[in-house]
């Protein structure tokens, strides 16, 4: 729901109009940047040869991107639960990986915590950005989270919305009554 703007100062209004116009693009590229930083942290701290760690780290981040933004490939009105699940698991894994790698490089005490918190903040902020971005995108597309299994019966609260016009005509159904002897009468 869009609130009406009540700016007294037109310069202030122009700043916020600019933020509103540019924020989606800035946020999207910020998410891509955090993916690249996460990949760089993986490459730097994982004890693998560069010819293995570079393509592997980029593939992991591309996989994350692909799953997180999959609902926008062909927006159908329903959201998959997978983007949030994959983003959460990838974030937890990246944080654990960073911690284990730092410990494996004999980084201890203040050095460990400084590196872990610094890298962890980049990873965590990227996670928060991507979850909010996909939530706002889903709002913009009018997508709803699937709350029931496909094909399950609807409850009284849910009203299906047809995507095309249906020609509705009254259909007469003959009444069937049953007698006590088990035969039906038409």
Image (cartoon, helix red, strand yellow):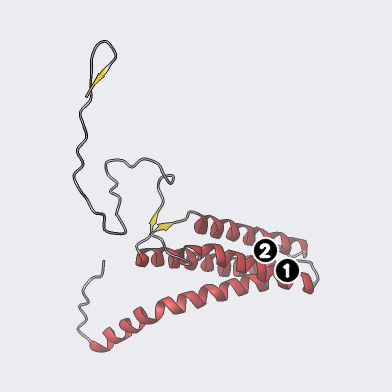
Q: Nearer the viewer, residue 91 or 108?
A: 91
Please report whichever mark, 1 or 2, sits nearer to the chain's N-terminal start.
Answer: 1
Q: In the image, what residue occupies the spot 67% across and 66% down?
A: 110
Asked if the residue at tag 2 contacts the one at tag 1, i.e. Cβ–Cβ closer than 8 Å, the answer is yes
CA gap, disc 1 and disc 2: 7 Å
Q: Residue furthest right?
A: 49
Q: Is residue 113 above or below residue 144?
A: below
Image quadrant holding the N terminus, namely: bottom left
- Res 119 → quadrant: bottom right
| Mark 1, secondary structure of its residue | helix
Q: In the rendered image, is residue 71 in sight?
A: yes
- Res 94 → quadrant: bottom right
Q: Nearer the viewer, residue 3 or 9?
A: 3
The numbered disc on residue 45 is 1
Callout 1 crowding tier (Cα within 10 Å): few <14, some 14–19, many ≥20: some
> Residue 19: x and y, percent?
36, 81
- 49 sits left or right of 175 in the view: right
Q: Residue furthest front?
A: 186
Q: In the image, what residue occupies the spot 61% across and 65% down?
A: 63
- 99 sits left or right of 74 in the view: right
The residue where tag 2 is placed is: 98
Q: In the image, what residue occupies the spot 77% across and 61% down?
A: 104
Q: In the rendered image, is residue 44 in sight?
A: no
The numbered disc on residue 56 is none
């Amino acid at each position: 729901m869009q609130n009406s703007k009540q700016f007294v100062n037109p310069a202030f209004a122009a700043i916020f109009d600019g933020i509103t116009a540019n924020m989606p693009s800035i946020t999207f590229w910020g998410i891509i940047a955090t993916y690249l930083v996460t990949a760089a942290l993986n490459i730097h701290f994982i004890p693998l040869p560069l010819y293995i760690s570079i393509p592997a780290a980029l593939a992991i981040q591309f996989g994350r991107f692909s799953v997180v933004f999959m609902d926008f490939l062909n927006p159908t009105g329903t959201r998959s639960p997978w983007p949030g699940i994959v983003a959460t698991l990838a974030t937890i894994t990246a944080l654990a990986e960073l911690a284990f790698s730092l410990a494996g490089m004999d980084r201890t005490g203040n050095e460990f915590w400084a590196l872990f918190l610094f890298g962890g903040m980049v990873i965590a902020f990227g996670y928060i950005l991507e979850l909010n971005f996909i939530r706002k995108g889903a709002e913009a597309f009018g997508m709803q989270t699937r709350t029931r299994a496909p094909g399950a019966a609807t409850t009284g609260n849910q009203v299906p919305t047809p995507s095309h016009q249906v020609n509705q005509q009254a259909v007469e159904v003959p009444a069937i009554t049953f007698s006590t002897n088990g035969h039906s009468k038409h």
